[in-house]
Image: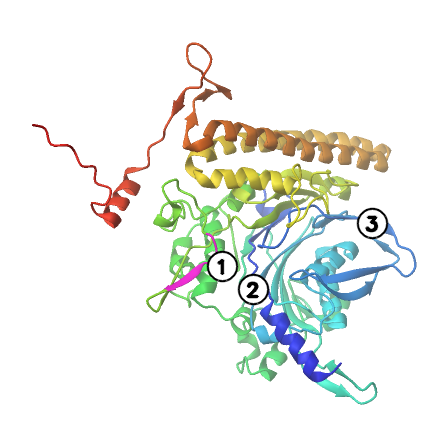
Amino acid sequence: MNRNVFLTAILFQLLALPVLACTSYLVTPGASADGSSMISYAADSHIRYGELYIFEGGPKAPGSYFQAYYRGSHKPLAKIPLPESTYHVVGYINEKQVAIGESTFGGHRELFDTTGGVDYTGLMQLALMQAPTARDAIRIIGELADEYGYYSLGESFSIADPHEVWIMEIIGKGTNLQYDPATGDYYNADKGAVWVAKRIPDGYISAHANHARIMTFPLADGRQSITNQQFDKLHEPGIRVIYSHDVIDFARRKGYYDGDDVRFSFSDVYAPIDFGAARFCEARVWSMFKEVAPGMDQYMDYAMGFDLKNRMPLYVKPDRKLSVEDLINFKRDYLQGTDFDLSHDIGAGPWGKPYRWRPLTWEIDGKTYFHERSTATQQTAFSFITQSRREFPGPIGGIIWFGVDDTNTSVYVPMYAGMRKAPDTFREGYGSIIEYKEDAAFWVFNKVAHFAYLRYSLKLPDIQKVQSELESRFMKFVPATDKAALELYNKDPELARDFLTDFSVSMGNYTVERWQELFRFLMVKYIDGNIKKEEEGEFLTNQWGKYPIVVHPEYPEWWLRTIVELTGDKFLYIEEEQD
């Protein structure tokens, strides 16, 4: 490739990088109410679409390959050969109950390798197709990045299996073009990535939200930590840290670090903390930690960007065991109960909408201001909570609780790792971010959410009522489904998979139908700024049964006073003088 053309392509790709923002929680078996490993994820992006991917497992024909694409633009990357057989994958969990989530932390932008052949989503999907354990997923991600080059910014991965939960952070090495006289072409002499993976101690929880969180780590000693040159020790029981062998040396060569090995902090070196990283990213981690871990008040100033030296720990011990319901509630966090609650400042408007349209920062009179960024956000394409449960065979034990659009107005539906197909309303390719489908799950949930944004505090209780109805029902269905599926599995595993498919598909499609019904109800009840009175879903009418009983909710007093303060007497009602 001509060098000038190549450098132009690099500049174009860097300018085209999307701003991504995702929030992930990690719960170890010892910290969960039912002994399962759990991770959560939210695909927050203004260009992504909410759909459930399924990669069929089993034997692969000779010559089969995985076509990698760059998630930010769908640019084709490398064609990566597949092994003779792969695992079945539903969303982001495979039949071995290995689950992976992520959040982009960016880091040094010059480390984006524009010659790379696989991006972060490709690494996730390929790892899920091939990894029987979380540790194997780490190995596969590291090996693929080295072999094909890493075409992404810095990334944090949540990786779980039924026994362990890991956080892995990775960043590329940039584009160091060297001329090869043998081929007459340029190549990247720094192809690959540097990374660190830490196992979360059992009984603890962790989280990440678009900022690198791994700081110092024990160096390889053959008992607790290994490098990627020691993968033969990968499955030794005591291993709790795995890292690329050159993660420190490369930082020295780039001039990022000149200290002792033992003081090396991956986060501080490859993604230095600043106000934005704290307030927009670490604040989401803090807001989850504070709900279940004592002593988190000491880190509030850090999370709010006021004291960047008092870093939060990577993991904390919760004061109670956490359930799927807890993680769902955490996903709906908008800093409520704090001084930074998005529903309480002027930006929320009169009806307490906890969302701020982009951009998050703006400039007035030479000063930069910002809106808060919370876990619940309008641009979520899809989100999930996975469970990896060691007491069940993989197809039954693995569950991905899957929802589309805004987490605060979504519903999490249980989809089993053994299901063969997605519900039609959720399946890949049924609609897109630029193709509206009337009954596609993504668009159905979006239209309810956008109607709610108009008068949020008034409509949210109606949404939460149906949300709770569905999710509570699913929580009760799952134990019975587990039991029935296990009985079938012991007799005929394939019949059990058919059963799990029927259950998952029917629950997904029923959820969309129920949400369509909710939309119709909301439209009738709240049209034109009025509220039609109702009881148990039935609208009340006048004594002749012809017209509805309508009320007109008043604006809150604080909002009316704000209007007066801003406009003075402009809207003062002038009374006529009486003779």
Quick check: is 558 in the magenta stretch? no
Residue occupying image coordinates x 57% and y 73%: 109
| Residue type at numbered disc 1 | Cys
Q: Is residue 365 left or right of residue 468?
A: left
| Residue type at numbered disc 2 | Phe
| CA distance for labels 2 and 1 | 9 Å
Residue under label 3 = 57
- The segment highlighted magenta reads 357-363
Residue extending farthest left = 579
The dot on residue 281 is: 1
Asked if the residue under mark 1 is in contact with the one under mark 2, i.e. CB atoms within 8 Å, the reply is yes
| CA distance for labels 2 and 3 | 31 Å
Q: Quadrant of the C terminus?
A: top left
Residue occupying image coordinates x 65% and y 46%: 386
Residue under label 2 = 105
Q: What count of labels does the image hold? A: 3
Mark 2: which secondary structure? strand
Q: How is the image coloured?
A: rainbow
Q: As displayed, is residue 11 above or below residue 451? A: below
Quick check: is 360 in the magenta stretch? yes
Residue extending farthest front = 579
Q: As displayed, is residue 487 above or below residue 133? A: above
| CA distance for labels 3 and 1 | 36 Å
x and y percentages locating residue 183 in the rendered image: 83, 85
First in sequence: mark 2 vs mark 3: 3
Q: As displayed, is residue 146 above or below residue 157? A: below
First in sequence: mark 2 vs mark 1: 2
Residue 154 position by quadrant: bottom right
x and y percentages locating residue 308 in the rendered image: 42, 67
Mark 1: which secondary structure? helix
